[in-house]
């Protein structure tokens, strides 16, 4: 039995196999529609989520399985003071696999130590979001045709954005990746990412504050929202929330084949007018999220078809 707590839990080869499986699911959905019959996914979401929670649930249902769980801490025994350790021991009696989102960093890891079923980290605080990272990798590989030789701009909340932290760690294992980190000074990438990953790994990266200046060199632009829930006071959030807004005027500075991604939800950091631009890939990204979570469930439950092993 294994868990997915961090995008680095899978080797580059294992990720490649997972993405191949996800692409095969996209092409041949009927082939996979009954592989999880009789299996249950426990969806344990201690904080709000739309895409991630429903994506996991859709993935399991598409595989012929079923879903149990809760969508907020207030509707679980956590409201009565039950620990994560006790919750996962109980859930292990009911389900075959678990997806957990928790506001506290490290909570899914704590759960994995007491669990008798595979645990998938569906986001823990500002720390990691590995299934979003797998979604991002699948989207980039499917739409750009590669995961190496890419200049990627990461824009917005780079301090608290767990999707950004996970994606940097994952892409750092591929060749010829350049990172352009676009943020206000107050929301710069944490020092442990800058020093332990980018500087230590000898990566080509730059930190800038001007999105328009960065745009012409990018193969991929990864936008993020400024997250109200990560701020300690409303004044700081209001001051930061409109730092970067991508619109059609700014898109004029981009390459004709630049790909725009966003983990969603967006607030106003991508204008709705950009939705019609063929370079906008964020809604395709949502669909790829279902495919990659289907592939992950099959992998962790050891239900991958023989021809895809």
Image (spheres, helix red, strand yellow):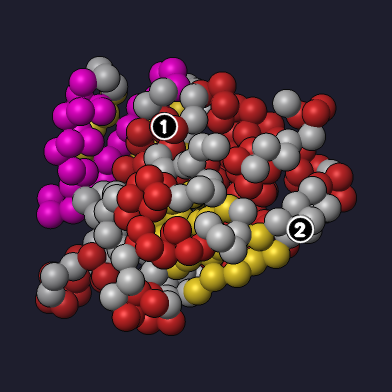
6 lies above or below 158: above
Image depth: mark 1 or mark 2 in front: 2
Q: Earlier in the sequence, mark 1 or mark 2?
A: 1
In magenta stretch: residue 159:
no
Residue at 49 percent of width and 24 percent of height: 11
Question: In this view of the protein, which residue sits in the foreground, 57 or 194?
Answer: 57
Residue at 43 percent of width and 82 percent of height: 75
119 lies above or below 149: below
The residue singled out by tag 1 in the image is 8
Question: In this view of the protein, which residue sits in the foreground, 284 or 14?
Answer: 14
Whether residue 17 is visible to the viewer of this picture, yes or no, is: yes
In magenta stretch: residue 197:
yes
Quarter of the figure with residue 143 = top right
The residue singled out by tag 2 in the image is 38
213 lies above or below 56: above
Question: Picture coordinates of residue 284 (x, y %)?
Answer: 63, 53
Whether residue 285 is visible to the viewer of this picture, yes or no, is: no
Q: Which residues are magenta?
A: 174-200
């Amino acid at each position: 039995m294994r868990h997915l707590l961090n995008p680095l839990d899978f080797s580059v080869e294992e990720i490649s196999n997972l993405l191949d499986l996800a692409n095969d699911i996209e092409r041949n959905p009927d082939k996979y529609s009954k592989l999880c019959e009789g299996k249950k996914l426990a969806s344990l979401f201690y904080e709000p989520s739309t895409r991630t929670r429903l994506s996991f649930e859709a993935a399991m249902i598409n595989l012929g399985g079923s879903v149990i769980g809760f969508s907020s801490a207030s509707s679980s025994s956590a409201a009565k003071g039950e620990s994560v350790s006790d919750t996962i021991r109980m859930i292990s009696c009911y389900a075959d696999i678990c997806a957990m989102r928790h506001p506290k960093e490290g909570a899914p890891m704590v759960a994995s130590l007491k669990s008798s079923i595979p645990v998938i980290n569906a986001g823990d605080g500002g720390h990691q979001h590995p299934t979003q990272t797998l979604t991002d990798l699948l989207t980039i590989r499917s739409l750009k045709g590669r995961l190496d030789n890419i200049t990627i701009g990461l824009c917005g909340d780079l301090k608290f954005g767990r999707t950004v932290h996970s994606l940097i760690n994952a892409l750092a294992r591929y060749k010829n990746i350049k990172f352009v980190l676009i943020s206000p000074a107050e929301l710069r990438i944490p020092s442990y990412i800058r020093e332990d990953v980018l500087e230590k790994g000898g990566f080509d990266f730059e930190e800038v504050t001007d999105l328009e200046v960065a745009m012409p060199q990018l193969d991929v632009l990864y936008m993020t929202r400024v997250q109200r829930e990560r701020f300690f006071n409303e004044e700081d959030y209001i001051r930061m929330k409109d730092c970067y807004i991508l619109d059609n005027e700014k898109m004029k500075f981009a390459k004709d084949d630049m790909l725009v991604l966003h983990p969603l939800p967006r607030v106003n950091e991508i204008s709705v007018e950009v939705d019609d631009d063929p370079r906008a890939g964020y809604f395709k990204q949502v669909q790829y999220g279902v495919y990659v979570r289907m592939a992950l469930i099959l992998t962790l439950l050891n239900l991958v078809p023989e021809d895809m092993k």
